[in-house]
Image: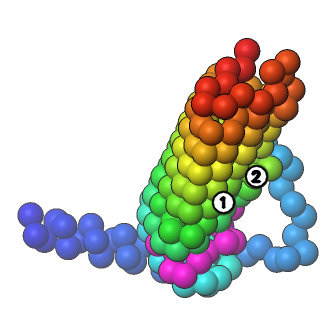
Amino acid sequence: MKKLVSMALLAAIAAPAFAQEAQLSDDAPAVPRGERRVSDSWPAFFAICEFPSATDIAGLRITIPYSTRHVNVTGIDVGLWGKAQYFEGIQVNVLRNDAKDSMAGCQCGIYNTAGSGNLVGIQAGLWNEANSMSGVQAGLVNVCGETDGLQVGLINRSDTMHGYQIGLINIIREAELRFFPIVNIGF
């Protein structure tokens, strides 16, 4: 059993060394929204700032202190500050979790964002924001454009809402009753 675990660990560590690295330059054109760029992926990645500059992760990413250049991340992201264009899985970074275009899964940290994209899942932290959301936001401040689900926090704000807001200040900008404390319902 020890040999099997040792071999699996060695394979997980050695695989990135043999994976082809896809280079992203600052001049590269942006990937159109909804279109995922596909490149080689690594099963485990220990990010030390921006080295290497671009890879896709399918498995575990440890971001010490941060990692911001990965396009597709699928799996678990743990550390201080993690950012990806497309993320599927669990992001648990102390300072910031950022998914630029789409996020499916769970974000836990001080600042969580799916800022210009869609969130399907859960955000839990001090500040949570998403362009559109189907799921749950739980934190001190929850901000969303189109919400389909639940917001629980001290301050909840949504442009459109199909669901519930529970908190001290609840705002649905495009509703007949825009502000209501404790519980606000959007139809």
Query: Which disc number belongs to residue 115?
Result: 2
Q: Does the magenta stretch include residue 157?
A: no
Expressed as whole percent of the image width and height from the top left, the position of residue 140 reads 59, 51
| Mark 1, secondary structure of its residue | strand
Expressed as whole percent of the image width and height from the top left, the position of residue 143 reads 72, 45
Residue annotated with mark 1: 98
Residue 167, by quadrant, is: top right
User: In terms of sequence position, does the residue under pointer 1 or pointer 2 come before the other?
Assistant: 1
- Residue 7 visible in the current orientation: yes
Q: In this view, does 130 lie to the left or right of 109?
A: right
The residue depicted at 90 percent of the width and 64 percent of the height is: 29
- Residue 101 visible in the current orientation: no
Q: Is residue 66 magenta?
A: yes
Q: What stretch of residues is rendered in magenta? A: 62-72
The residue depicted at 70 percent of the width and 49 percent of the height is: 129
Identity, as a three-letter code, of the amino acid under mark 1: Asp
The residue depicted at 87 percent of the width and 70 percent of the height is: 28
Q: In which quarter of the image is the N terminus?
A: bottom left
